Image (cartoon, helix red, strand yellow):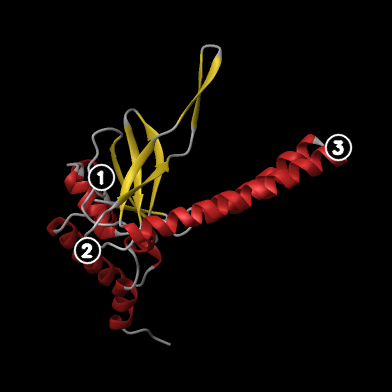
Amino acid sequence: MEVSTEAVRQNFRSKTDSELLQVAALGQELTPEAHLVLIQELRDRLAKVKETPETVRLVHGWYTVVAPITGIKFPELCPRCRRSETASSLRFGSPERRRFHSFWWKTTSVVSSVPHCFTCAAELKRSRFIWSCVGGMFGILWLATVIWFHVPRFVTYIGFVTIGVPVGYFYDRTSAVKLGDHESGVVEYRFRSHEYAKAFAVLNNVQAENAETIQTELEEAISGLR
């Protein structure tokens, strides 16, 4: 059954930028009509990117902004519910990095206090307390089991990891903020809210550093299809 040009156009429009670029990479397998529609859609998206360039990247469901570790400012709204009032701050830590220095390992991490409204701060603190207690209780029970039954060391590690992974997930499951990798004086701030992430980037003057590179990718894809 022959597919109409309009159906092909709607199919391309429904795809994300990454998906459309993947289609462009397989351009030789397209029909001549689909080839032309694909170029047109890529040009339309390129025009939009040039008109309103994106200042934050979407990475695994989180809007990510790379910013300095020190001297950071936060928008005057809660990142979780986006109300315009912040009454309390919550501490968030980055994953630890280990580097070998001469004769020892050096472990570093970054901690940042992010303002939240009173309600969201209270809910997150309660969630953290509950799951900290749950993790501690199961950790103690497993340690007692290891000592009592002389569990092998390898199995002991597996048990602690099995306890730690779900507890770590639920500890900040409803959070709208987390910290990612850090190096050379900068750290990744990750937000659930696109609006909050853009405001954070503007407030800290890091729009240029976090601008998407999609423009270059679109231009290369169009050039490759000609």
Q: Which residue corresponds to the image point at 45% horizontal and 53% vertical from the top-left?
A: 125
Front-lying residue, 48 or 54: 54
Mark positioned earlier in the residue sequence (2 or 1) = 2
Front-lying residue, 181 or 114: 114
Q: In the rendered image, which residue does mark 1 sit on?
A: 210
Q: Which mark is residue 150?
A: 3
Disc number lying in front (2 or 1): 1
Front-lying residue, 200 or 48: 200
Q: Residues within 10 Å of mark 2 (few under 14, many from 20)?
A: some
Q: In the rendered image, which residue does mark 2 sit on?
A: 45
Inspect this view and state whether residue 151 appears. no
Q: Quadrant of residue 226?
A: bottom left
The image shows residue 73 at horizontal and vertical percentages of 22, 42
Q: Quadrant of residue 82?
A: bottom left
Front-lying residue, 191 or 54: 191
Q: Which residue corresponds to the image point at 32% horizontal and 82% vertical from the top-left?
A: 7
Secondary structure of the residue carrying numbered label 3: loop
